[in-house]
Image (cartoon, grey):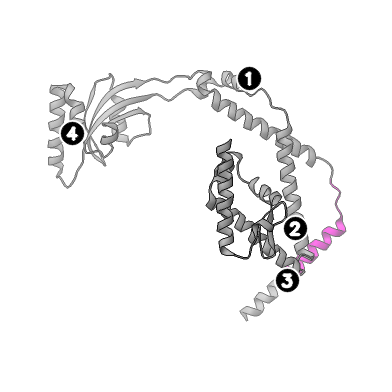
Amino acid sequence: MRIIKVTVCFLIIVISLELTAQQETTDVAALPDGVIAKRGNGYVTRHIFDARMDRVPVKDRASVLRSTDRTTKILADLLLSSQLKAEAEAAGFDKGDVLYRMQLAAETELANAWLEHYLESQPDADYQAMAREYYLLNKDQFATQPSIDVTHLLVKENQRTEDELETIAQGFLDQVLADPSVFDELVVNHSEDPSVKDNSGRFEGVKEGDMVKPFEDAAFALEEPGDFSGLVKTQYGIHLIRLDKKNPSRVPSFEEVKARLVNNQRKIYREQLKYGYLNELSSAPWEVSEKELESIVERYSNQETALLKSLEKNIE
């Protein structure tokens, strides 16, 4: 806890220095209680800063506050916005249509905040029981696709003629057929696949559709672990493939998929709560003023007509 306090204090000092370096007349110590920063007619209160931080996911807030660059940027943006607001109010610009746009923004923000609060205040369901029920009813959905593990050696074209390419690949195949135990060493020392340095030529869990078709057809045609393909030509060159293991389809246990299913059921339940609540509110009967609707249609029609006339005049 002491380390956190020291870090926060240091952060405050650094941010204060960065902000005051741009405006030496700012006296941070003389600011009223609750005001974090001030510039010109703009100021940021702790409540405004908290409202801005509410937009940052909870898991990321500590890291944001530990970054002087990010925190300074947030404060600078809030200060600039406050300055612009002060300028607008001084000019009497906060009237008429702008006032209604402000009201719309406030209503939208309040509506979204309330909906989030409503959902968070609802009791949780037994998500694990729901997940288990879904698993039992849909086991087939969790079956894994059959796959194979293979090792391959690649000889790339590299400006070789087709005969040269086949001669080199055939030489490796002859060595392997004479002594299969040399294959791994040949792969590590001679395969021209760039990934060989990381995977020693091994591809695990290869499913149908993962590889180019000639490679896939040859690999899946192998029957027993240790079997080798002939020379397999693809756009990458000529491959020599060994089947290492066959992985049949299997249904994972509930424990293996529980975390994912519980998370999915939580999301589904929350969405159902959300739309159930919204449908309840929106199912109430409407009361509509035909007079106001006609007035709106007429007003926008007049605006459209005026715009068309202006365009026609400019074209002429």
Q: Secondary structure at mark 3?
A: helix
Toward the viewer: 231 or 24? 24
Q: Which residue is mark 2?
A: 102
Q: Earlier in the sequence, mark 2 or mark 1?
A: 2
Q: Which residue is mark 1?
A: 129
Q: Position of residue 19 (x, y in %)?
A: 58, 59
Q: Residue at x 15, y 42 (%)?
A: 162
Q: Which residue is mark 4?
A: 189
Toward the viewer: 146 or 256? 256
Q: Which residue is mark 3?
A: 305
CA separation in Å, label 4 and label 3: 78 Å
Q: Earlier in the sequence, mark 4 or mark 3?
A: 4
Q: Residue at x 84, y 43 (%)?
A: 285
Q: Earlier in the sequence, mark 3 or mark 2?
A: 2
- Are discs 2 and 4 less than 8 Å apart at CB? no
The magenta span reads 286-303
Mark 1 against mark 3, which lies toward the viewer?
Answer: 1
What secondary structure prevails in the magenta region? helix
Q: Specify whether residue 307 is painted magenta.
A: no
CA separation in Å, label 4 and label 1: 53 Å
